[in-house]
Amino acid sequence: MTDTAPPLLRVRSLRKQYRSGDTTLEVLRGVDFDLAAGEFVSVVGQSGSGKSTLLHLMGLLDAADAGEIELDGVRVDGLSTAGRDRLRNTAIGMVFQSYHLLPEFDALENVLAPLMVRYGVLEWLRVRGAARAQARGLLDRFGLGGRLHHKPRQLSGGEMQRVAIARALVTQPRVLLADEPTGNLDEATGAGILETLCELNRTDGLSIVLVTHDAAVARRADRIVRLAAGRVEDALPVAQRLAG
Ligand code: ADP
Ligand code: MG
């Protein structure tokens, strides 16, 4: 990256609090975070430290109370709902611990869903063939070529997560945000999912933010960022951070 190129994702002074009744919980108290294009960063921190909150704000699923988020040098935190939806359908891919697949859709339909949302009915008829080929290609790549018409309930946890990753990638996003993607999986299956993410980063240059409370998972990234007391601690390379 040159000095003048902005980071892919730039977060400044991000604040988020939750109110319930007369108590206020300050979860994020001024978070600063950068992700360079092509970088793979893990975000760690104790349960309740605000990891999911931060990821949801960066994924434009929720709005911050204050602060700035830039994607490719463009402010995205103040967008309208339609503007956020559009970015989430084009530039940002998200993966969750519990997969969030649509139960009545098969694997292929789940992967196609973001593209069906993107195009109107008439345009969908025109692009459907290419979209299906692209979705099949992703499912094939993730070893699910024989599971195209399985519903989520007919798939294992690892298979469901690979469908969810394919769905996140079918829009060709600039960044993948993953919230504890191995959290519901046994160790070997989780390791396979992690391997998939590493390969997407190394082979395809996909930029990734991975939230995890698991140090062994976190250390697969290029860099680890720790959330504590509502802020990001000073970033250290992986080796130093885990030694500390
Ligand atoms: P983490 O992912 O690091 O475990 P979260 O970001 O999910 O942490 O949550 C941070 C804190 O904010 C927790 O104490 C949680 O209970 C609280 N919290 C999260 N979401 C909400 C919400 N929608 N309303 C109220 N409190 C919330
Ligand atoms: Mg969480």
Image: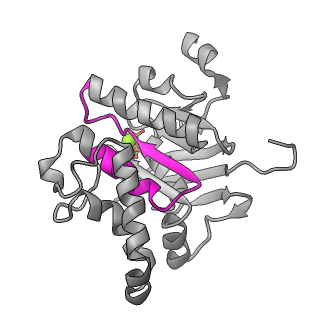
Q: Does any portion of residue 212 appear in the rendered image? A: no
Determine the residue positioned at 54% across, 57% down: 173
Whether the magenta-drawn stretch holds residue 183 is answered as yes
Q: Vertically, is 184 above or below 52?
A: above
Q: Which residues are magenta?
A: 160-186
Q: Vertically, is 2 above or below 193?
A: below
Total labels: the figure holds 0
**Location of residue 105 in the rendering, given as x and y in whole percent from the top left corner:** 20, 64
The N terminus: image quadrant: top right
Q: Quadrant of residue 38?
A: top right
Closer to the camera in the image, 219 or 32: 219
Q: Residue furthest right?
A: 3
From the viewer's perspective, tell me whether residue 197 is left or right of residue 190: right
**Location of residue 113 in the rendering, given as x and y in whole percent from the top left corner:** 34, 68
The C terminus: image quadrant: top right
Q: Vertically, is 64 above or below 11?
A: below
Q: Residue furthest left?
A: 154
Whether the magenta-drawn stretch holds residue 189 is answered as no
Closer to the camera in the image, 226 or 188: 188
Q: Does any portion of residue 170 appear in the rendered image? A: yes
From the viewer's perspective, tell me whether residue 66 is left or right of residue 209: right
Q: Residue furthest bottom?
A: 122
Q: Vertically, is 44 above or below 7?
A: above
Determine the residue positioned at 54% across, 54% down: 58
From the viewer's perspective, tell me whether residue 154 is left or right of residue 164: left
Determine the residue positioned at 59% across, 55% down: 174
**Location of residue 66 in the rendering, given as x and y in whole percent from the top left corner:** 62, 59
Determine the residue positioned at 51% across, 61% down: 60
**Location of residue 158 in the rendering, given as x and y in whole percent from the top left corner:** 26, 38
Closer to the camera in the image, 63 or 2: 2
